Image (tube, helix red, strand yellow):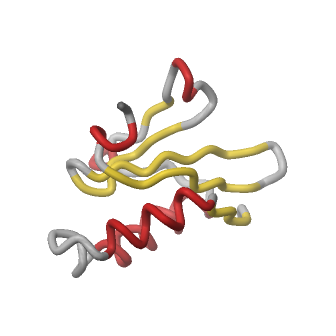
Amino acid sequence: MLSIERSTAFKRDFKRVRSTPMHTKDIESLLVKVIGLLVDEKVLPQQYRDHPLSGNWMGYRDCHIKPDLVMIYRLTGQNTLQLVRLGSHSELFK
């Protein structure tokens, strides 16, 4: 089981996303489900489109919590799941 580390940017992103009307009802339950799978080191189902990133984000991964809601994370060598960013593609990959 991995420990969880949330970046300051992720915390800020989460507050912003949670206050968005289209995400208010289900965002927390969806994140708990996805993060739970990652912490238990299980493979995410295909629907989350988990994949490695390249370029400036080399070493990180992203998965789709919703069609246009992406979570960027990475697994470190210290058995830690780092939650880095949360937002739409246009917000995160400018």
Residue farthest right in this picture:
78
Q: Residue at x 31, y 72 (%)?
A: 27
Q: Position of residue 4 (x, y in %)?
A: 67, 65
Quadrant holding the N terminus: bottom right
Q: Is residue 44 left or right of residue 73?
A: left
Figure quadrant of the C terminus? top left
- Residue 73 location, x and y as percent? 55, 47
Q: How many badges with numbers are in the image?
A: 0
Q: Position of residue 22 (x, y in %)?
A: 15, 69
Question: In the figure, 53 relative to 38: above or below?
Answer: above
Q: Is residue 84 above or below residue 35?
A: above
Left or right: 2 with respect to 19?
Answer: right
- Location of residue 60 (image quadrant): top right
Instruction: Please report the residue visible at 36 percent of the width from the left and 77 percent of the height from the top.
Output: 29
Q: Is residue 75 above or below residue 35?
A: above
Picture quadrant of residue 81: bottom right
Question: For this view, does 25 lie left or right of residue 65?
Answer: left
| Between 41 and 3, the one nearer to me in the picture | 3
Between residues 70 and 20, which one lies in front from this camera angle?
Answer: 20
**In the displayed image of the protein, which residue is found farthest to the bottom?**
25
| Residue 46: percent from left, percent from top | 32, 44
Q: Please name the residue shown 29% across and 76% down the image.
A: 19
In this view, which residue lies farthest toward the left? 22
- Residue at 25% x, 56% y: name it: 66
Q: Nearer the viewer, residue 13 or 61?
A: 13
